Image: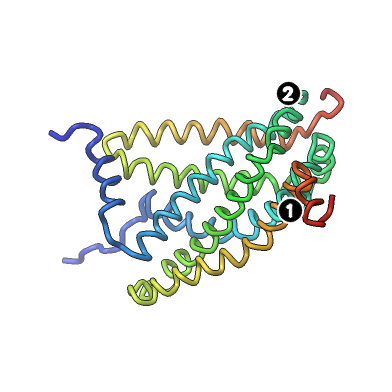
Amino acid sequence: MAVRTQLQPSFETIAWRWMRYSGILLIPLAWIHVLIQDVIVGVHKIDINYVAMRWANIGWQVYDILLLAFAFAHGMYGLRQVSIEHFPRARRWLSVVIFLLWIVVSIIGAFAIIAGARPELA
Amino acid sequence: MAPPSSAFRTTVTGYALYKGREGQYAFLLHRLTGLGTLLFLIIHILDTSTVYFFPSLYEHAIELYRNPIFMMGEIALVFSVIYHGVNGLRIAIIDLWAPSKWAIGFTRNAIRGTLLLSLLLWAPAGAWMFYNMLLNSFPEVLRSIGLGG
């Protein structure tokens, strides 16, 4: 009798792999962002006009959407893993709350990037 | 039946008692830098979103980041992003393409390597950010040692 050994990868297996691929991608994506904004430009030169100028460029809008999508999903999945490991009895509850927080904050961030800054109202 | 917090207490006392040497320290530092970066990231997404939703609030948010205490936090954040990336790259490469390299001897050396590489990448960025913090918040300190200002 033939025994089927090939299993369909579970959500957890796919997520495990995805954390590694997204992490590799985030090294250039997040490091370039940090190098430009925190080290080279610096918080003293950043204001709403600077953000408006950056998001007037579709290239930087796409860059920031990718950063938001990959970095925040990577971080929130990591938070889920750490928290369900520490509180295994609250696994389902933690997964739902973290998922909802991820969706809501991602939508807020993506909306702002696409709609752009409104320095005329500042 | 165990009380609800017992698993949490077990992991916390486990962190303190387990003698895992390099592997355990890398594991803890990876979690700490990851969670620290995520905490900042949540705040950062929301404060940056004010440029569209509440444009008049953005300047107040940025003003907070210009506080020297926050700028020191920013230097720690840059270390977190660098270390989490370097150590994460070690984990990803070994997990995906060379799982036999999880042998303890190689792992301990690789962990020392990731920490060294992270510190080397961080040092120039951190020094430059510290200089800018002094330049903007305490220019008299820089002048007194004959720098900038």
| Numbered circle sitting on residue B120 | none
Residue B103, horizontal then vertical, whole percent: 33, 74
**In the image as oriented, which residue stretches furthest toward the right?**
A120
Instruction: Name the residue located 33 percent from the left edge and 73 percent from the top edge.
Output: B104
- Which residue position is annotated with label 2? B54
Q: Amino acid at mark 1?
A: Tyr
Mark 1: which secondary structure? helix
Answer left or right for B82 relative to A33. Answer: left
Q: Is residue A61 above or below residue A102?
A: below
Instruction: Name the residue located 68 percent from the left edge and 52 percent from the top edge.
Output: A34
Q: Closer to the N terminus: mark 1 or mark 2?
A: 2
Answer left or right for A30 relative to B138. Answer: left
Residue A33, horizontal then vertical, whole percent: 69, 52
Mark 2: which secondary structure? loop
Q: Chain of mark 1?
A: B
Tell me the quarter of the image containing the N terminus of chain B: top left
Residue B70, horizontal then vertical, whole percent: 64, 40
Instruction: Name the residue located 73 percent from the left edge and 53 percent from the top edge.
Output: B131
Report the Cα–Cα distance between label 1 and label 2.
32 Å
Answer left or right for B123 relative to B32. Answer: right
Q: Amino acid at mark 2?
A: Phe
Q: Is residue B126 above or below residue B108?
A: above
| Numbered circle sitting on residue B131 | 1
**In the image as oriented, which residue stretches furthest toward the left?**
B1
- Front-lying residue, A82 or A107: A82
